[in-house]
Amino acid sequence: MMRLLSSHLLPGASILSIIKKILISDTALDLDDLNGLIQNNAGESGAAVIFTGAVRVSAEEQGLTGMTLEHYPGMTESQLEIIIKKAQAKWHLTRVMVAHRVGYLTPGEPIVFVGVASLHRKEAFLAAEFIMDYLKQDATFWKKEHYADQSHWVEAKESDREAVSQWDRV
Amino acid sequence: MMRLLSSHLLPGASILSIIKKILISDTALDLDDLNGLIQNNAGESGAAVIFTGAVRVSAEEQGLTGMTLEHYPGMTESQLEIIIKKAQAKWHLTRVMVAHRVGYLTPGEPIVFVGVASLHRKEAFLAAEFIMDYLKQDATFWKKEHYADQSHWVEAKESDREAVSQWDRV
Amino acid sequence: MKINVLFFASFKELLGCSSISLDISQENATIAGVCQSLCSRGERWKSVFDEPSKTVKIALNQEMAELDSPLNDNDEVAFFPPVTGG
Amino acid sequence: MKINVLFFASFKELLGCSSISLDISQENATIAGVCQSLCSRGERWKSVFDEPSKTVKIALNQEMAELDSPLNDNDEVAFFPPVTGG
């Protein structure tokens, strides 16, 4: 079930129509659809940056069989709205799409999608990274990792708190 | 005609196989294909950042009918190789894809695609931005803008030279 | 007053409970009062809510809150560990 | 010695020429020597290659080069404006 939580296309702005969407989904994220929403912008934007995070199986996660993502319905969406508004106050963004999986995920599956379009590439890079950093710190999601013989909740990382503190300088 | 100029999959590295591709194309970039190469990485990477630049029609370019992209065959590819190698020396990248259009493009069409996958999001963001900044400064492409009543070659921007000088600090 | 209390992630698992409805007296109407009331439910509850550490995050009506935040009837209070999404 | 000279973008248009094969004497075997030879082809050529400005970029065998870079037989020299891709 894919739920589009907010989506508005301002009719007045012919070239710079602003598209903003938040999606929390308990089924696989359709990356082609999400990419298209940001990248196929008919020349109104010029620059687009997309971040995707997937369930990783590197040296640290050897033997990982899957992951469960839980969230706080209602609060998650309002936290994401706040983060996007903060980004829009800093940079001129023509399109913003944030999508996040919940439920059970297998290795390689996308967890999160952050896409922004802008007139200039620097703004697009900064905004996408800003939204990801704040999502990591403020959005009410929790990960549980499953291995063959055990499961455990993922612990928050100090590096993610540091990532957010950098933005005070921007 | 899509020409893949370099592509190697190191067979030894089972989890961290490195994929690196450069593509100069005189037909439309297939963004779905390019996105997939970076985003569908079977859990080996975790983080992926994609930048796309398209022919823009904002206030500055009102009335733009199209754009011609010219390049220096041979030198362009070797410059892109050098840029990617510099990025790989700074960050651990599991996948890198750089694609660039040449020929005649209409508004909204993608000009450039830079995609990187990595274990960590910070590395992916930095590498994608680094590659774009150096591509803008060093890769031998030239843009000519077409309007109804005139055409002109685009002038290089001071801001692009400044963007590259930032990386001395990283 | 009636307070709806939610638990997420490891807290939900540890306590075996995802939500609970509490009756809180007017003089106990802060989040600290909710914690005090929860402690009476047993040792596991006490381990989390007796002097809750920094790793116990609190939301009041879906916004981040503190132990001394005052409560009103029908408020929603949530307890959860630091978030780990993305 | 034989030098293959290429022109790109606005230079190609201005000069009406995308490549030219030059014969350069041993004592003139630098890129400055190539510029000198090109100047003899007319006013338009002179406007670009007589004391070429910073906006004339030079590549020798597909690597960036300078006016004093020495040349060898069959080298490829390219002249172009600052790049504007991406």
Image: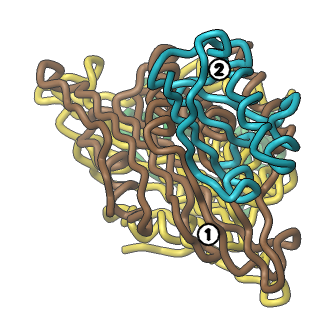
Chain colours: A brown, B yellow, C cyan, D green
Q: Answer whether residue C60 is visible to the viewer in this image.
A: yes
Q: In the image, which disc is placed on residue B21?
A: 1
Identify the image quadrant of residue C67.
top right
Q: Chain of mark 2?
A: C
Q: Exactly how many numbered labels are in the figure?
A: 2
Q: Position of residue A161 (x, y in %)?
A: 79, 32
Q: Answer whether residue D38 is visible to the viewer in this image.
A: no
Amino acid carrying label 1: it is Lys
Horizontal side, residue D65 vs residue B57: left or right: right
A162 over D51 or under it: above or below: below
* Front residue of this view, candidates D30 and B52: B52
Circle 1 or circle 2, nearest the eye? 2
The residue at the point 23 percent across, 46 percent down is: B106
| Circle 2 residues within 10 Å: few <14, some 14–19, many ≥20 | some
SS at mark 2? loop
| CB under 8 Å between discs 1 and 2 | no
CA–CA distance between discs 1 and 2? 49 Å
Amino acid carrying label 2: it is Ala
Marks 1/2 same chain? no
* Front residue of this view, candidates B147 and B62: B62
The residue at the point 28 percent across, 51 percent down is: B104
Horizontal side, residue B111 vs residue D27: left or right: left
Q: Which residue is mark 2?
A: C65
Horizontal side, residue A17 vs residue A85: left or right: left
Q: Chain of mark 1?
A: B
* Front residue of this view, candidates D56 and B2: B2
Q: Position of residue A163 (x, y in %)?
A: 77, 32
Image quarter in which the N terminus of chain B is found? bottom left
Horizontal side, residue B115 vs residue B153: left or right: right
B161 over A68 or under it: above or below: above
